[in-house]
Image (cartoon, rainbow, N blue to C red):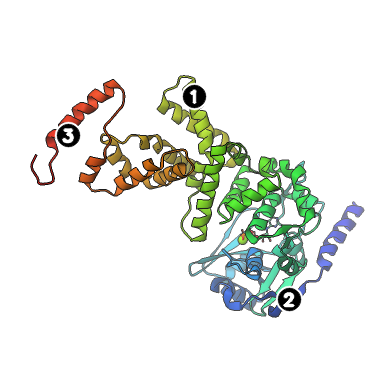
Amino acid sequence: MIRKLLRRVFLRGESAKRQAERIPASRHGIRREQVSTGARRTCEALQKGGFKAYVVGGAVRDLIAGIPPKDYDIATDATPEQVRGLFRRSRIIGRRFQIVHVMQGPETLEVSTFRAAHDEDTLKDEHGRVLRDNVWGSIEEDAARRDFTMNALYYDPTEEVVLDFHHGVDDIQRKTLRMIGDPRARYREDPVRMLRAVRLSAKLDLRLDPKVQAPICDMADLIDNVPAARLFDEMLKLLFSGHAVACVKRLREEGLHHGLLPLLDVILEQPLGEKFVMLSLANTDARVRADKGVSPGFLFATLLWHEVLTCWEKRQQAGELPMPAMFAAMDEVLDQQGEKLAITKRVAADIKDIWALQPRFDKRSGRMPARLVEQPRFRAAWDFLVLRAQSGEAPQELADWWDEFAHASHERRETMLVADSGPKKRRRRSRGRSSRADETKVSPDGTP
Ligand code: ATP
Ligand code: MG
């Protein structure tokens, strides 16, 4: 008991002892105006209230690396209630890790209270994964519990100084991703850090410190113990980082795509599937970088499509009719992957809409095409068809036809429709329909 207590004091003392290096603007290169107005105002208000306040984490790292941050996190010694008391437009969120969302104009800032480092009393699962850590601590402890050295930087916009506890600024300048503490222990505490290492190295074009890289291969299985919802969030971050292609390439180079991203395992092993997925990821990267909207439904529909195709084919070979087989295949794939990836019901519904419309693109006769282009999901489904065409799975001519049809006048559409070449029974029906259409068809000069 006494030993435990001593060790705890010692451990806390170790991290608390580490002095921050105060890096001046001439070395870190951040200009105050580069920091968003909302982040500056939030820090100023907290400091006026008598608290410490810093921009922290990814935003500081990105600013030093010359990349515009996508959002800002603020760290403070004020408790969530104290923060809440200072900002009219704010709310406390989270039950276990309480943080405060502060609204400043169009921005939402995430304000967290400094957290304590883990110690022997921290609740962990049987693999060593940390289950709970919501004890407030000092700024030194807060820095020590962050993952990589370059993520433990604290920028004070008032003094324009960066507090650097673990030589993170040097590591950014040397383009090396280094872990705070022992990488093996840190991966055990939170296996998601393996994914973060790959994502950050792709985003910032960093070399992985060999100590960060080496354990990943044999520890990748620990990812299985991460709750699905957390993994899903992390996957979205990776896939919507604007560097998804680079991330996936790195995962493969490191031999990490197995296990880390169970979803990609199967797909990347099918030649056509790989081309399709890579095209889709490149397309997503381009949209993210151009600040265009991206939807998880669309992306997951592309990632899982080749599994659906395989399953669909199997069912048809077993004698099922095409459409029922398609719907059954969709459900089967979503049931398997959806659970692992915590795909929400809403996203699953979007995915199904896009898939279910694909076979309908093959019907270019009768009244179906006009109905299809009126569907609310037509545009997404057509974008999906374009990807299929680019990967060689569908004819390009088909994608072009639908694009022209969707934008054509009523008259032009009539001339575009392809004569139905279905089985005899259907042909007879369509003949009937077309003869009726002939009766009512009006020539350009208005005569029947
Ligand atoms: P991005 O630019 O993609 O947002 P980020 O590093 O800011 O990258 P966030 O998920 O926004 O990633 O996390 C904010 C900060 O919280 C990180 O910079 C890091 O300091 C800390 N952090 C996040 N996840 C972990 C983790 N799994 N373990 C330790 N610290 C973490
Ligand atoms: Mg961030």
* Mark closer to the chain start, 3 or 1: 1
Badge 3 amino acid? Ala
Q: SS class of the residue under badge 1?
A: helix
Circles 3 and 2 in contact, beta carbons < 8 Å: no
**Quick check: which quadrant has ligand 2?**
bottom right
- First in sequence, mark 3 or 2: give its number: 2
Residue drawn at x 49%, y 44% as measured from the top left: 347
Q: Is mark 2 within 8 Å of ligand 1?
A: no
Q: Earlier in the sequence, mark 1 or mark 2?
A: 2
Please state which of residues 255 and 329 is positioned toward the viewer in this rendering: 255
Relative side of 377 to 306, left or right: left
Give x and y (percent) for residue 202: 64, 56
- Observer-side mark, 3 or 2, equals 3
Residue furthest to the top in view is 319
Circle 1 residues within 10 Å: few <14, some 14–19, many ≥20: some
Q: Is residue 6 above or below residue 258?
A: below
Label 2, residues with CA under 10 Å away: few <14, some 14-19, many ≥20: some
Image position, residue 386 (x, y; %): 43, 45
The residue indicated by pointer 2 is 23
Q: Quadrant of the C terminus?
A: top left
Residue 168 to residue 243: above or below: below
Task: Categorize mark 3 by other alpha carbons within 10 Å: few (<14), some (14-19), many (20+).
Answer: few
Disc 3/disc 2 C-alpha distance (Å):
78 Å
Q: Which mark is residue 437?
A: 3
Residue that label 1 marks: 315
Residue under the image location 63 percent in, 59 percent down: 203
Which amino acid does the dot numbered 2 rest on? Ile
